[in-house]
Image (cartoon, rainbow, N blue to C red):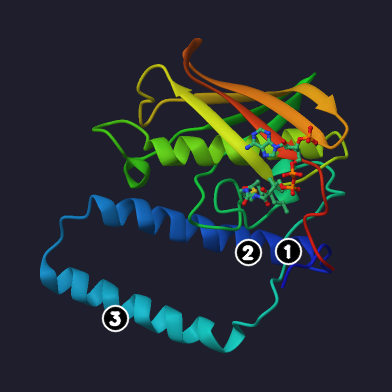
């Protein structure tokens, strides 16, 4: 279940990614759907059919890596199914990670499915982005481990539908501890900032 390798072809990865894209769009549309009962009943029937088509292929093993510590290229593929950043998990918004010098950047726009305060991103979603982004920043040092604490200062509301730039960088590395700092910018303005402590240890019991 927690495989660190996969023999999935590029084609297989592409069709799986497309599936998550469709599901993500359906989730977003469902939040603001104002259709007649008859239309929704029809949609429900079609979704039930899709569930039936998928069921025989549902196994206890993921098609792709649960965790890929040796990923090259797309940093989102370190955890392809991450609930926060996995491009193969429809629950995750399409956030894009990218290393820029000593900073790990996460760019994303959130829609209605992620709303907390009116027209703003839910604080728990923001916390999730920091946890994942900062964990990956720590992994880039070759040392990884669980989050011991994650502190967030919410300076200003974080708007929906706007380009958000999350940044994370290593602040301190000592023995088995990594402290990572982060901030999120909207049009150049810091709206939230954070600090997390990660304790270095094996994440997986193989
Ligand atoms: C495969 C990729 C997955 C990536 C997932 C993204 C990251 C996550 O979401 S992880 C999920 C959230 N985190 C968790 O569930 C962790 C749950 N907590 C734990 O497992 C443990 O408490 C753990 C591992 C953090 C620390 O326990 P343990 O390994 O026994 O360490 P412990 O000996 O208590 O502490 C080690 C050091 O850290 C310090 N420390 C531990 N916790 C804290 C804290 N909250 N604040 C400050 N210092 C702390 C200790 O004081 C100690 O310091 P020193 O070495 O100087 O004496």
Looking at the image, residue 152 lies above or below residue 56: above
Secondary structure of the residue carrying numbered label 1: helix
Could you say which is closer to the camera, residue 99 or residue 16?
Answer: 99
Could you say which is closer to the camera, residue 78 or residue 196?
Answer: 196
> Residue 15: which disc?
2
Residue sitting at 72 percent across and 23 percent down? 169
Left or right, residue 202 beside residue 11: right
Looking at the image, residue 73 lies above or below residue 49: above
Tag 2–tag 1 contact (CB < 8 Å): yes
Label 3 beta carbon less than 8 Å to ligand 1: no
Real-space Cα separation, disc 2 to disc 3, in angstroms = 23 Å
Within-10-Å neighbours for mark 2: few <14, some 14–19, many 20+: few
Tag 2–tag 3 contact (CB < 8 Å): no
Residue lying farthest to the bottom in this orientation: 56
Residue 165, given in percent of the width and then of the height, sits at 55, 23
Disc number lying in front (1 or 3): 3
| Total numbered badges shown on the rendered structure | 3
Q: Which residue is mark 1?
A: 11
- The quarter in which the C terminus is drawn is bottom right
Residue 194, given in percent of the width and then of the height, sits at 56, 24
Residue sitting at 20 percent across and 69 percent down? 40
Within-10-Å neighbours for mark 3: few <14, some 14–19, many 20+: few
> Residue 92: which disc?
none
Query: Residue 63 falls in which quadrant of the image?
Result: bottom right
């Amino acid at each position: 279940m927690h495989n660190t390798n996969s023999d999935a072809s590029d084609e297989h990865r592409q069709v799986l990614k497309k599936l998550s894209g469709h599901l993500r769009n359906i989730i977003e549309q469902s939040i603001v759907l104002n259709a007649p009962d008859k239309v929704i009943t029809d949609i429900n029937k079609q979704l039930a059919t899709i569930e039936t088509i998928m069921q025989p292929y549902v196994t206890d093993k993921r098609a792709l890596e649960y965790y890929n510590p040796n990923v090259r290229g797309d940093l989102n593929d370190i955890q392809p199914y991450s609930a926060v950043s996995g491009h193969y998990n429809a629950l995750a918004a399409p956030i894009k990670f990218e290393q820029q010098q000593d900073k790990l950047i996460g760019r994303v726009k959130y829609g209605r499915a992620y709303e907390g305060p009116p027209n703003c991103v839910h604080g728990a979603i923001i916390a999730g982005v920091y946890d994942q982004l900062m964990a990956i920043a720590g992994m880039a040092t070759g040392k990884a481990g669980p989050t011991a604490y994650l502190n967030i200062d919410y300076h200003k509301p974080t708007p929906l539908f706007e380009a958000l730039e999350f940044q994370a960088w290593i602040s301190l590395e000592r023995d088995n501890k990594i402290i990572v700092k982060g901030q999120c910018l909207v049009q150049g303005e810091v709206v939230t900032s954070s600090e997390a402590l990660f304790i270095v240890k094996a994440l997986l019991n193989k």
